[in-house]
Amino acid sequence: FTGSSSAKKNTRRRTSSYRLATPNVPTNNVAPETVVGVTLWRLRPARQTDSGERLIVHEDNSDNEWIPERISASTRLVQGDKLRISVEAVRGGYLYVIDREQYADGSLGEPYLIFPTRRTNGGDNSVGIGRLVEIPAQDDNPPFFTMKKSRPDHIAEVLSVIVTPTKLDGLQITDKALKLTDSQVATWDKEWGST
């Protein structure tokens, strides 16, 4: 290379900025085998300006492209938002997800077992180390939950995630969410509850 000079290129490095979607969760006195990773995803329609991985899902027999965006548990959702839950456990067992509506006065609605159902993952609720379970699964129809307000003071959804070493007895799994009793949930919370 002999004595030529070159002008410096203006090479500004583009930096990525990340937003913490999960609040600081204290891990003191948490048994490692009780850890369950839960991620909430809001699906939004793809835009022409989007780049990167896209998820193609079916909704009402039409092809739509959806982009999953990770959200925090405190994200405000609106009627019609489409959601997916992904869960990963650090041990093998069986996964159960209970949903309750929360109202403005702090009270909770009736508990419903929203996973497993035969409509989601064909009713398979087994989990294993490193196995990600999506609820609903990407190949379920439709592959998302839709937010619907049941009454004017309905302000939130409260999810309880349980991983048990054996299947829970006495559950009649069908295509729909199973209505539970408060006493069933209280018993499970006492037996399986953790920090």
Image: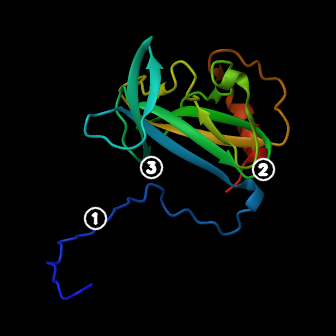
Element at badge 2?
A: loop
Precedes in sequence: disc 2 or disc 1:
1
Precedes in sequence: disc 2 or disc 3:
3
Q: Quadrant of the N terminus?
A: bottom left
Amino acid type, label 1: Arg
* Location of residue 156 (image quadrant): top left
Q: Which mark is residue 91?
A: 2
**Residue 193 on image: x %, y %:** 72, 48
Q: Nearer the viewer, mark 2 or mark 3?
A: 2
Closer to us: 179 or 135: 135
Q: Residue furthest bottom?
A: 3
The chosen color scheme is rainbow
Residue at numbered disc 3: 72
Position of 157 with respect to 77 (left or right) is right
Q: Quadrant of the C terminus?
A: bottom right
Q: What crowding class fits label 2: few (fewer than 14 Cα within 10 Å), some (14-19), or many (20 or more)?
A: some
**Residue 137 on image: x %, y %:** 59, 29
Q: Nearer the viewer, mark 1 or mark 3?
A: 1
Between the residue at mark 2 and the residue at mark 1, the CA separation in whole angstroms equals 40 Å
Q: What crowding class fits label 3: few (fewer than 14 Cα within 10 Å), some (14-19), or many (20 or more)?
A: some
Q: Which mark is residue 14?
A: 1
Element at badge 1?
A: loop
Q: Residue at x 58, y 27 (%)?
A: 110
